[in-house]
């Protein structure tokens, strides 16, 4: 039986990836040198298309790392001398704060319970804070900030750097990147690619801050410091031997998404999310974990379950549909369903029907 993955990362491959993989093998992409003209063209193609897809303003750079987790560490090393502030509402936003603590920075945490988001209008942040870390879409709980929250933080704290986690919502979320200084993602979620590649968006303010810290004699990391990444990117290269195949595939999928159109992708995701939330509401065993509809994720949907999550996962697996269990302490109490661009309307409709059939 063919299986289809609605897991929130890694997830189902984007539907064009198989053909792009074949082309990559035909072109010997995995074998080319990362210092070759061929790789420079792959790098240029991918970064140019990502800048177009995200509608990045001038002065914003795109760098590649091994994962989004790496970017947590690199960003603290490069951008925080003394103190960072983290909005925490789930496991992944907490982990970013934990990395800052591990690196010896003073870490202010503004915490709300899982399933909610921080009320940005009520937060107080000290002037000594250098970086504000906000998670647009908390993958562990399905709680999503309204887009206007980023603008409110920017207006309230113009001097601080703002870091935005877009790991499980890009490119769906229509973000104005001029309001943030850095954003980051990993490709195994909405882009539907094999894991092993992180994408770091950083502006000139970030570059300047890292150079300032370096000038003070601080350690900002080695080969993946922002100055090193920038110097190599200006040659369409990376400091190390990178995931060449991953960068190639990312460029191809970005090209496919642009051809389809972001407006179409967003409309489809909105429709599919409505189908799934409707199934949660009608089900005898499910209810949305995030109670406020304004903060319910459209790309990572989380439901509370009245039976152990493994019961539902096993029933769906019998039909070839693989969904995610709850994260961490919610493993048996939640299910998580990815609603990414690769998941078609028809597939989501079938999944919703199967959710309603459980127990009947």
Image (cartoon, rainbow, N blue to C red):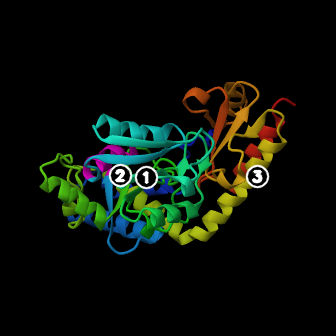
Q: Residue 277, labelled with which disc?
A: none
For residue 197, above or below residue 358: below
Residue 14 in view of the camera:
no
For residue 76, above or below residue 148: above
User: Dot 3: what SS?
Assistant: helix
Front-most of residues 292 and 257: 292
Please check the rendered image and state whether residue 69 is part of the magenta-colored stretch, yes or no: yes
Q: Earlier in the sequence, mark 2 or mark 3?
A: 2
Residue 271, quarter of the rendered image: bottom right
> Residue most toward the bottom?
58
What is the spatial separation of the Cα atoms under label 2 and label 3, in whole angstroms? 42 Å
What is the spatial separation of the Cα atoms under label 1 and label 2, in whole angstroms? 7 Å
User: Dot 2: what SS?
Assistant: loop
**Do the residues under discs 2 and 3 have CB atoms within 8 angstroms?**
no
Give the x, y percent position of residue 85. 40, 48
Residue 264 in view of the camera:
yes
Q: Residue at x 56, y 43 (%)?
A: 8
**Do the residues under discs 1 and 2 have CB atoms within 8 angstroms?**
yes
Front-most of residues 85 and 211: 85
**Do the residues under discs 1 and 3 have CB atoms within 8 angstroms?**
no
Q: Residue at x 47, y 50 (%)?
A: 193
Give the x, y percent position of residue 192. 51, 51
Label 3 sits on residue? 275
Give the magenta range. 65-78
Q: Quadrant of the C terminus?
A: top right
Give the x, y percent position of residue 42. 32, 63
Q: Residues within 10 Å of mark 1 (few under 14, many from 20)?
A: some
Label 2 sits on residue? 129
User: Dot 1: what SS?
Assistant: loop
> Residue most toward the right?
360
Please check the rendered image and state whether residue 294 is part of the magenta-colored stretch, yes or no: no
Label 1 sits on residue? 125
């Amino acid at each position: 039986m063919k299986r289809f993955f609605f897991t929130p990362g890694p997830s189902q491959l984007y539907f064009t990836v198989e053909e792009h993989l074949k082309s990559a093998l035909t072109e010997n992409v995995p074998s080319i040198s990362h210092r070759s003209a061929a790789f420079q063209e792959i790098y240029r193609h991918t970064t140019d298309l990502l800048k177009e897809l995200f509608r990045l303003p001038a002065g914003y750079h795109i760098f590649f790392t091994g994962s989004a987790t790496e970017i947590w560490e690199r960003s603290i090393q490069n951008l925080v001398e003394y103190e960072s502030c983290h909005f925490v509402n789930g496991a992944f936003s907490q982990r970013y704060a934990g990395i800052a603590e591990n690196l010896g920075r003073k870490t202010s945490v503004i915490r709300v319970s899982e399933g909610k988001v921080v009320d940005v209008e009520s937060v107080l942040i000290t002037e000594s804070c250098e970086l504000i870390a906000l998670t647009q879409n908390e993958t562990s709980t399905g709680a999503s900030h309204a887009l206007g929250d980023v603008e409110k933080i920017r207006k309230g704290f113009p001097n601080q750097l703002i870091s935005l986690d877009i790991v499980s919502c890009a490119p769906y979320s229509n973000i104005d990147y001029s309001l943030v200084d850095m954003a980051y993602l990993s490709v195994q979620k909405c882009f539907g690619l094999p894991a092993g590649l992180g994408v770091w968006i950083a502006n000139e303010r970030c570059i300047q801050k890292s150079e300032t810290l370096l000038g003070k004699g601080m350690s900002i990391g080695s080969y993946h410091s922002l100055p090193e990444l920038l110097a190599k990117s200006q040659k369409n290269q990376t400091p190390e031997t990178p995931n060449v195949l991953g960068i190639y595939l990312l460029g191809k999928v970005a090209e496919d998404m642009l051809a389809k159109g972001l407006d179409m992708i967003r409309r489809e995701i909105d429709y599919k999310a409505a189908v799934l939330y409707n199934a949660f509401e009608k089900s005898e065993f499910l209810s949305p974990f995030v109670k406020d509809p304004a903060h319910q994720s459209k790309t990572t949907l989380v439901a509370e379950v009245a039976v152990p999550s493994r019961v539902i996962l096993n029933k769906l697996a019998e039909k070839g549909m693989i969904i995610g269990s709850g994260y961490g302490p919610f493993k048996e109490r939640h299910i998580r369903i990815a609603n990414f661009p690769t998941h078609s309307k028809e597939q989501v409709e079938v999944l919703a029907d199967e959710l309603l059939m459980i127990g009947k």
